[in-house]
Amino acid sequence: MNVAGPDYRYHTLVVTVENKSGVLARVAGLFARRGFNIESLAVAPTDDDRFSRLTIVVDLESAPLEQVVKQLDKLVNVVEIRELHPGSAVERELMIVTVEAEPDRRDELVEQLDRAGGKVLSVGADRMMLSLVGPPKRIDEFEDLLRPFGIVELQRTGRVALPVLDEDA
């Protein structure tokens, strides 16, 4: 397993685990006991219902990647650990956000949302609920763009990622 250079603070691991109760708790407990910081965590079953996939974005300032991988590998229910190098994976995140949106500012807000590729989910008297799916950096930028409107409530999923397809495949 290759470790990213010093320019990469966060690193993505895709961990395949047995789809059994308590596995997520054991993984989370391992991180808590060792003081490893999880920046993002997404969990879902795979196409094979015997397994689940955890996409874990690890803060390398809290622990060396090699140490995180060694500790994960010791867990009984862990089947496979893959490192996704920055730039060699497709990463996506979902944001759903409710913002203040008086009628006279909605056109501006919808224009920004259209540019980002998002959708309006719901419209109220003075608020709008929006969604955006994209790379984490684009989600961060759009969140910053919404701050002047007034964010009422915001929810972001954890990052999901898969390796870039090999052109020879």
Image (cartoon, rainbow, N blue to C red):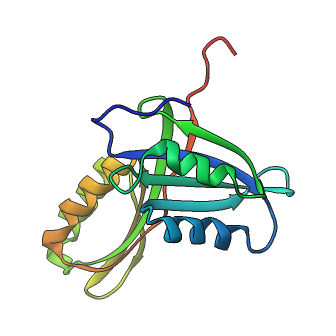
**Could you tell me which residue is drawn at 67 percent across and 49 percent down?**
73
Q: Quadrant of the C terminus?
A: top right
**Residue 63 point in image, percent of width and height:** 41, 53
Residue at (52, 51) in percent of width and height: 68
Q: Residue lying farthest bottom?
A: 125
Residue at image coords 34%, 31%: 5
Question: In the picture, which quadrant includes the N terminus?
Answer: top right
The answer to whether 22 appears left or right of 25 in the picture is right
Instruction: Judge whether 126 appears above or below 49 on screen.
Output: below
Give the side of residue 135 with respect to residue 104, left or right: right
- Image position of 167 with respect to 30: above or below: above
Which one is in front, 53 or 131?
53
Image x and y of residue 151, in percent = 25, 77
| Image coordinates for residue 20, horizontal then vertical, percent | 81, 68
Q: Quadrant of residue 154?
A: bottom left
Q: Is residue 165 above or below residue 52?
A: above
Query: Residue 140's x, y, as percent?
Result: 29, 56
For the residue pair 152 and 18, the one nearer the viewer reads as 18
Count of marks overlaid on the render: 0
In percent of the image, x 48 and y 29: which residue is there? Answer: 88
Residue 83 lies in quadrant: top right
Specify whether 47 is left or right of 106: right
User: Does 42 sit left or right of 57 as displayed?
Assistant: right
